[in-house]
Amino acid sequence: MSATFSRVFEIHGRDFTNAGRVSTEIKDLLKRMGIDAALVRRVAIASYEAEMNVVMYARHAVLILTVTPAAVALEIADEGPGIPDVDLAMQEGWSTATSEMREMGFGAGMGLPNIRRNSDAFTINSMVGHGTRLSIRVDVM
Amino acid sequence: MERAVVRVSEVSLTLAEVRDLLEAQVCWASDLSMRVSAIGAADLMSDVLAFGRPGMLLLTGLNTPQTVRTAAVADLAGIVFVRGKRPDDNLVVMAQQANLPLLSTSLTMFEAAGRLYGALFGSGRTDE
């Protein structure tokens, strides 16, 4: 693959029925592009955790997928409450999830650490009252 | 270490063997001769995403769309719902689209995991 490929997806907060659909679509798309299965899996897991965070906490988000010969990148910018203490949120096990979120098997404080674990580069910027922006990059080996 | 790898590889189970061991019903599967390379049990999907391996069979009591999406995203081999949980029609359709076998057993998570562990690593097996 030589050209850069990019696509924009929308994620809606509180839409638990469709939570994960965007990440499943991204995974299928990357597989069809012939990208290595292990790399696709890492992108899909990071994307899924980010998507669940938007559904659980934010009102709305735009996810931009970019594929280059060197890497797959995800930019997720949400409109939501923001995270007051990002360092705390990055700690495994720290969570503000409700019981409704936990009943779906999420909200145990594993999301952001899982995203970092599957990324080669990961940045998070958050502004309380405005939203959170994640940049995730997974390199092609 | 090499011996351990061979051991796990040799004792891998087919979905049909899993069905028999767990007295499970097959809700949907395209091929019961498919082998599972690992087995894990969890209700927390973030744990599955963090610690699951491609080709793993998941035992879980959580029958939500997120369970099927998690399994698809993490390249799992299939799902066994425990404690008599059954997937609804929507979940079955999602599983078909992802080519993800679904089984259901009335056993508890503990007993289902115990039976599979015993079949794989129990003293009765002579797989050396």
Image: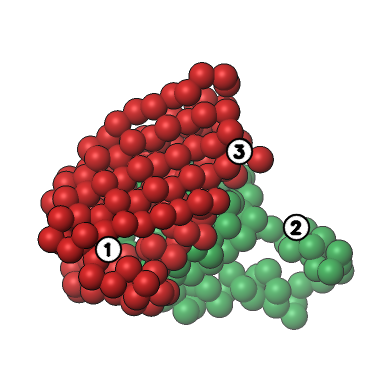
Chain colours: A red, B green
Residue denoted by label 2: B9
Total labels: the figure holds 3
Of the two numbered discs 1 and 3 in the rendering, the one whose residue sits closer to the viewer: 3
For the residue pair A100 and B125, the one nearer the viewer reads as A100
Question: Circles 2 and 1: CB distance less than 8 Å?
Answer: no
Q: Is residue B125 above or below residue A39?
A: below
- Which quadrant of the rendered structure holds the C terminus of chain A? top right
User: Identity of the amino acid at label 2?
Assistant: Ser
Percent coordinates x, y for residue A28 in the rendering: 44, 33
User: Identity of the amino acid at label 1?
Assistant: Met
Question: Circles 1 and 3: CB distance less than 8 Å?
Answer: no
Q: Chain of mark 3?
A: A
Mark closest to the chain's N terminus, 1 or 3 = 1
Disc 1 and disc 3 on one polypeptide chain: yes
Task: Determine whether the residue tagged by mark 1 lies in a helix, strand or loop.
Answer: loop
Distance Cα–Cα, label 1 vs label 3: 32 Å
Disc 2 and disc 1 on one polypeptide chain: no
Residue A26 shows in the view: yes
Q: Chain of mark 1?
A: A
Percent coordinates x, y for residue B93 in the rendering: 31, 39
Relative side of A117 to A89, left or right: right
Number of residues whose C-alpha sits closer than 10 Å to that of mark 2, classed few (under 14), some (14–19) or many (20 or more)? few
Of the two numbered discs 3 and 2 in the rendering, the one whose residue sits closer to the viewer: 3
Percent coordinates x, y for residue B80 in the rendering: 44, 60
Residue denoted by label 3: A140
For the residue pair B66 and A88, the one nearer the viewer reads as A88
Marking on residue A104: 1
Distance Cα–Cα, label 3 vs label 2: 29 Å
Quadrant of the image occupied by residue A131: bottom left
At x 39% / y 27%, what residue is drawn?
A6
Number of residues whose C-alpha sits closer than 10 Å to that of mark 3, classed few (under 14), some (14–19) or many (20 or more)? some
Marking on residue B90: none
